[in-house]
Amino acid sequence: MGVGRGERDELRRVVADFRRWRQLAEDVRDRHQAVQHAASSAEETMRTRSVVVDRAGHAAWRVLALREGDRDAARRLRERALLPAMTAADRALLRLLTDDAPSAVVDLAPMLDVRRYFTGPARKQSAVTAATFLRHRHAEVIATAGPERLAHLRVHAASVESARTSIDDLLDPVLRFALLAERTGPEPELVERSVFAALPAALATIEQVVAGEASYRSAARAAAEKVRQVEVGRVVRDMPVEALRTVTRDRFRLGPLADAGITTVQDVLRVGASLQALPGVGETSARRMLGAARTLWQTTYDDTPVRIDVDHRHPETTHLLRCLAEWDTHRRTRGAAADLERAAELASLGSTIDRRTSHLLVVPTRGLAVTGLRESIQLVIRRAELLKRSSAPGRRSVRADPWDDFLTRPADYFAMLSELGFATHDDNAVHGDLPDEIVKAVRDQALDGEHLTASLRGYQSFAARFALVQRKIIIGDEMGLGKTVEAIAVLAHLSSRGSTHFLVVCPAAVVTNWVREITGKSTLRPYRVHGPERDAAARTWMRHGGVAVTTYETLAWWESALRDHPDLGCVVVDEAHYVKNPQAQRSIRTKELVARAERAILLTGTPLENKVDEFRNLASFVRPDLTVDATDLTPARFRRQIAPAYLRRNQDDVLDELPELIEVQEWLPMSPADTERYREAVMSGNFMQMRQAAMLQAAQSTKLQRLVEIVREAAENKRRVLVFSHFRAVLDVVAGAVPGPVFGPLTGSVPANHRQQMVDDFSAARHGAVLVAQIVAGGVGLNIQSASVVVICEPQLKPTTEAQAVARAHRMGQVRSVQVHRLLSEEGVDQRITELLAGKRRIFDEYARVSDMAEASPEAVDLSEAELVQEVVAAERQRLLAPVPAPPP
């Protein structure tokens, strides 16, 4: 098919237009691609330089250290942002002008010059098709203002190169900086150099101190190992060779060993391979004997914890205490553990900061505001400054006699031994046999120690994290395990997360102790909302926040004000069994308070006293949704049902270092004076007089005579004594009769702040000192580890009352064995009450403790106090007042 001159001229104009447009399109495409590539390259480079900063084991922020040169990267991102967005029509136009049209122009070319005379039919047909395509596409480009669109895109692509930018522009969402896409929660921020300039040097200082501590830690570990090995040596030194037969099936002939003077396992180890030289002992027998001895040594080693015996101050133990003291001195100069955790988290960031770093771009990735990172940086810098000052020569000091420091704060030393791995515990005991899913959630929960100044044992940290995970719970740890510090750790964590107002409700007797513990173990501010200054303290707490410590009685006065306070981060209810009765007003007030708070912790070492129903009521405070099915209420089923709200651990399971508890029931005959007074009480039907009759005859009382002997023995053995009675009259008699310094009586009428002072004075007194206390006042909440002898003058009506009293002395921090003397009359009311106590204690063990004992319902053996009084008085009247048969003539 031929093409005329006019048509050829038209096609040449079309081709010329496409060639001109192609140049424009390629220029636009190349510029766009270059800007996109430069921006992506800048993003990738900055992402590679960025680091992730953790908080409590989880990624919290992505941080980029910016330099002046990053202004160019910001400009690249700005150029990309200013590029006009390509529409689908724009992309189709560029594809047409850079790919499709040039191909058609090549096919058409032979028809526009002399080659048309030599072109074959096929090429001509392709040229005709190309001509048609180019005419139609040319018309479309003109109709859609394609040339104008190209000019527009070209002008914008060229103009972005002159855009003015700064580092601040990186936060501009218009720039679509990929690093910002990781944000969750708060907005990203730029942190100025003044905030972080000192961080690398601070981290270097801390690293140097930690490295310096390693030698002290290693020395402490070696010293503890030595104590353990010496103790094992003492055991196997006294272990007869007959013990070799207990660890093997081999039948040893031990006669040759005895003939050679080898009588103990230690002797076997000492002689070693030379055993085979003994007459009657072959090589095989010698090898097996030695293997059995080594097995016994290793078994003994595995079962022997590192003990610190204050009554036997061996040289290796003294050396261990000195090493621990030196290690602890260095640990304390490098600050709180929380600061070191922050330093470890910031180490990667510190390595990216240099003198050229002008800003930090911080992108929150886990919902934590940038403020948290700023605070961490400042904490680490301040800690390093303290380390520089405390590391100066002459700042460190260790007491000449390390035993003095140990006796002042034994719990700290045992915590260090635990950290070194010498005080192990059963993980299941630490978990309180909680379900696996709860244990996993607790393990994953971070615990921020920023506002905590005390070291936590592993089981204490677990309890605090359990409270954080479950939000409202009961901690029923056995008395003496440190429930107070567990609760304080929760408040400290919540404070670091922004909570400001906390409330502790407790008996008046322990208000002072709570204020002291909060001050001594955290940086939180306590307020005593009790007593004459309660109004001012309450107003200050309302305005500034902190921890308000109040009583169940004061709660009635404060109830309306607290109801109007919306931001109660956590309520701690101490000695929570005080509110077990759902009908009592203090129970109703406390339950309403717990319901309104975001979190709540009920603390009680004795959650179950008489009936499971009472414990079920406590559980309803924190988890009203829990249903306890009473139709088949076995102990195991009960514990499963309350697991989400209840954590219970026992001393024996988690405190390996706790000294022995020696309990003695001293059954004593009544003197004639005791008997006469007891008979009068029975005749009058006065149950309370019956209980105290055997103590009120002063020097004529058999119980009091024995008590005086116990106090004298305690003084000779350098011990202090706690004397408990339910009755004020008994305490008065005791205070006037026992030798040595006497403190008390500590009764319910003693103001709360004076009770702690009384305990402090007693703890500072010489050995043989006696503190007399009403068991319901002094037996709750106070820490009296300075005493190691406890005397209970008469049996109590609740098993938990006596347990609380004993736990005042037998608790974490006690370094001596605790002797408990229960003074009991051989005849009369003491016998019946003791039987009752045994029954109630069995109920508690089945349900509240972790136990697989009998599965009987507790109601089957429960006996109320009214029933007890009626039964015992009737039985004693029958025994004492029945007619005596006449003697035979």
Image (cartoon, helix red, strand yellow):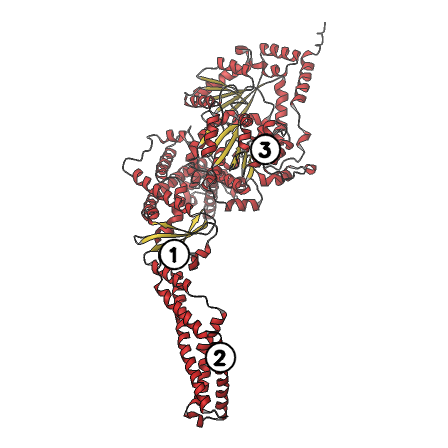
Depth check, mark 2 against mark 3: the one in front is 2
Compared to 84, does 390 lie above or below? above
Residue 477: image location, x then y, percent: 54, 34
* Residue at 40% over, 41% down: 337
Marking on residue 591: 3
Residue 758 lies in quadrant: top left
Q: Name the residue under label 2.
A: 139
Tell me if I can see residue 649 in this picture: no
Depth check, mark 1 against mark 2: the one in front is 2
Amino acid on which disc 3 is placed: Lys
Q: Mark 1 points at which residue?
A: 169
Where disc 1 sits, the SS reads helix
Marking on residue 615: none
Residue 420: image location, x then y, percent: 42, 41
Extreme residue in the bottom direction = 117
Does residue 647 appear to the left or right of 226 in the view shown? right
* Residue at 34% over, 30% down: 401
Looking at the figure, which quarter contains the C terminus? top right
Extreme residue in the top direction = 889
Amino acid on which disc 2 is placed: Ala
First along the sequence among labels 2 and 3: 2
First along the sequence among labels 1 and 2: 2
Residue 167: image location, x then y, percent: 36, 56
